[in-house]
Amino acid sequence: MSTRDKLVETAARLFADNGFGATGMSEILRRAGAHRGSLYHAFPAKKDLLVAVLERYRNGMDVRLIEPAWRGVVDPIDRVFALLDRYRAFLVDTECTFGCPIGSLALELHSPDEEIRALLVANFNVWTRKIEECFNAARGQFPAGTDFRALAVLALTTMEGGVMLARTHRSLEPFDTAVATFRDYIDLLRTADPGAVKVG
Amino acid sequence: MSTRDKLVETAARLFADNGFGATGMSEILRRAGAHRGSLYHAFPAKKDLLVAVLERYRNGMDVRLIEPAWRGVVDPIDRVFALLDRYRAFLVDTECTFGCPIGSLALELHSPDEEIRALLVANFNVWTRKIEECFNAARGQFPAGTDFRALAVLALTTMEGGVMLARTHRSLEPFDTAVATFRDYIDLLRTADPGAVKVG
DNA sequence: GTCTATATACGGATAGAC
DNA sequence: GTCTATCCGTATATAGAC
């Protein structure tokens, strides 16, 4: 593994654990076992390191997040909740201190420059697209005209809001409640009389 | 207005606009027109100022947020969406740079001490309780046994996730989509299984 | 309770040898 | 491309006069 990759991986971990602003270059160097010259040779400024971290999340989302979550799960609706369950596992593994790395950065960086903001958007879009494809694959179960992208957006807000509350409460309960309620909506949609449902 | 109150108000504004970590004591002093001695006399450490800010949000939520949102709105379900619409107005007023002050702090502070975490929880709880009361007031419209607290939690995650996405996208669209989809769920619940709807 | 001056540490970033 | 030494600004917090 190259020094550059090691730096990006270490930075990603520290940004996720402690935040971008709260992570010092010195700590990244220490944890990566690298030295100042190497870091600033590869990344002229801290912001460039953040760009690399966000590109890594976007490019690795399939292999690192989605595929493991969907291994052995074939039903598209089950896949939606398998991905949400992956986040639940992150919460369990961290005793409810987990935060979505993208969501945390999206709220921490109050005035990101356009490159950073575009990468945050790209990450959200990959996630949403994947879920939208699941709903679309199960479109036969939903009333005609159902907006699957809208369902995917609500899935994302449910996850992000659920993780936020679970971490704050140091409890799985708000996450489980939000996801269970979202699931109730999906189930209700699937059983609703197609003629009675109005969709945008 | 006391110097202390002026400091808390200024700090609240700056923490919301730029984040807790990104706000320097010097900037608070400059914007509040106060001096170092006054600040550290009232608040021995920056954390104490944050405590005061979070207490102010919790204590002022009714007067500053809920009541203005509900002025002239009597139907309890309309009130749920009137509160969500208040956040939409914040997004409009700030050209989609608004962030929920509580949600932003909840994600920025990765290792808050217990006092801070409890205050974040308290703020979320006040918000959720208010919405739960709305749903409960309209309980006749919902199937028997509907979990109104769960609906309130989903309302909160919809708002927090919606604000996060709207700010990242610099567009109202994700917020509007999330809220409209949540509303579709509520409407679906109210019309679902008419035989089970509690009458009287 | 208000004010100025200062302590001390650490932030990101740079210079230049090798 | 790697490494050490260092610059300079700013951070929180403190000391002590008034």
Image (cartoon, coloured by chain):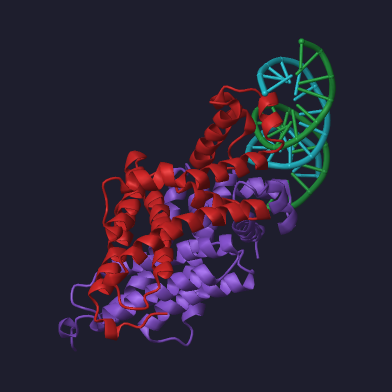
Chain colours: A red, B purple, C green, D cyan
| Residue at the (37%, 40%) spot, across then down | A94
Please state which of residues A24 and B55 is positioned toward the viewer in this rendering.
Answer: A24
Provide residue B66's location: percent of width, then percent of height. 47, 74
Q: Is residue A115 left or right of residue A140?
A: right
Q: Where A168 sits versus A2, above or below?
A: below
**Which of the pair B97/B181 is nearer the observer?**
B181
Residue at the spot 50% in from the left edge and 52% down from the top edge: A103
Residue A192 in view here? yes
Viewer-side residue, B9 vs B165: B165
Residue at left offset 55%, top offset 55%: A122
Vertical placement of residue C9 versus B70, above or below: above
Across and down, in percent, residue A2 comes to 57, 26
Task: Tell me residue B189's x, y (percent).
Answer: 27, 78
Quadrant position of the C terminus of chain B in the picture: bottom left
Q: Is residue B65 above or below residue B47?
A: below
Q: Position of residue A146 (x, y in %)?
A: 36, 75
Image quarter for residue A197? Answer: bottom left
Q: Left or right: B96 with respect to A73?
A: right
